[in-house]
Image: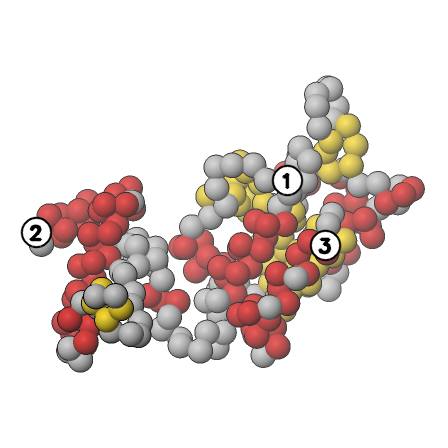
């Protein structure tokens, strides 16, 4: 998979992709991440990429010309499945969206900044708008890093255990069950006996029950009517 990112502050993202799981994915050739500096695509002096908004009001807006230059330049070499603008007023990013995007081959992410980007870019080039939550960040770089991480770990071969991602919270609209590791007893606190039983069918049943109960207590909004009825019967 290839993910290109347009940013005003590309150095902010470099460290994130140079470590841990995403770094290994890149080294294996499973994930290609390229960060492009928007200032390289402006014709204005001093690398200007923003200006005051028409109609007045506080805050600067990323100009249309540098963004269009960048998008059209990158499109010459790559046919993108989605051009995604990261914005607080986009669709909320959830696991099912990460799953769907992980099946694509080429993505272009546009990091917003200041008061956003010229609306004409959104109208004519952007195919999907995504928000990582109902709050405002200084820029879209952190949101882009979140999305790349969520997508990247789903790619076949990235995780050592292929089933690990399938057991994550939200994959089946349930939160993940509690997990334990050695030692079995610490300060008198014991690991649930079922996990030490070796009975894998019973363990999976216990984990499913724990996921249901945890979701009911912490995120009941995730449960559909069928799941609510199943929990009520247990």
Q: Residue at x 80, y 41 (%)?
A: 49
Q: What element carries label 2?
A: helix
Callout 2 touching callout 1 (CB < 8 Å): no
Q: Can residue 18 be seen in this view?
A: yes
Q: Which residue is nearer to you in this view: 136 or 183?
A: 183
The quarter of the picture where residue 199 lies is bottom left
Q: Dot 2 corresponds to which residue?
A: 233
> Where is residue 21 drawn, in percent x and y?
53, 70
Q: Is residue 127 visible?
A: no
The quarter of the picture where residue 64 lies is top right
For the C terminus, the quadrant is bottom left
Q: Which residue is drawn at 37% across and 70% down?
A: 164
Q: Which residue is nearer to you in this view: 129 or 19?
A: 19
Cα–Cα span, label 1 and label 3: 14 Å
Which is nearer the N-term, disc 1 or disc 3? 3
Q: What element carries label 3?
A: loop
Disc marking residue 171: none
Q: Which residue is nearer to you in this view: 75 or 55?
A: 55
Q: Residue at x 79, y 45 (%)?
A: 66
For the N terminus, the quadrant is bottom right
**Relative horizontal placement of residue 28, taking residue 78 as reference (left or right):** left
Q: Dot 3 corresponds to which residue?
A: 10
């Amino acid at each position: 998979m290839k993910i290109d990112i347009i940013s005003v502050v590309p150095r902010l993202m470099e460290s994130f992709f140079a470590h841990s799981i995403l770094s290994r994915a890149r080294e294996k050739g499973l994930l290609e991440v390229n960060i492009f500096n928007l200032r390289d695509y402006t014709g204005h002096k001093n690398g200007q990429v923003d200006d005051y908004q028409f109609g007045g009001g506080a805050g600067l807006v990323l100009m249309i010309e540098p963004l269009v230059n960048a998008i059209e330049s990158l499109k010459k070499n790559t046919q993108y499945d989605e051009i995604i603008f990261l914005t607080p007023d986009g669709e909320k990013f959830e696991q099912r969206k990460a799953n769907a995007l992980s099946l694509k081959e080429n993505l272009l992410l546009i990091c917003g900044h200041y008061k956003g980007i010229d609306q004409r870019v959104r109208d004519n080039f952007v195919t999907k708008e995504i928000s990582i939550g109902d709050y405002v960040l200084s820029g879209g770089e952190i949101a882009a890093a979140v999305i790349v991480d969520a997508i990247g770990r789903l790619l076949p071969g990235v995780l050592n255990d292929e089933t690990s991602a399938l057991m994550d919270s939200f994959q089946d609209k349930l939160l993940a069950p509690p997990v334990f590791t050695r030692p079995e007893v610490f300060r008198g606190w014991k690991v649930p006996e079922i996990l030490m039983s070796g009975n894998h069918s019973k363990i999976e049943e216990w984990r499913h029950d724990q996921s249901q109960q945890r979701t009911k207590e912490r995120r009941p909004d995730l449960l559909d009517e069928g799941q609510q009825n199943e929990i009520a019967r247990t």
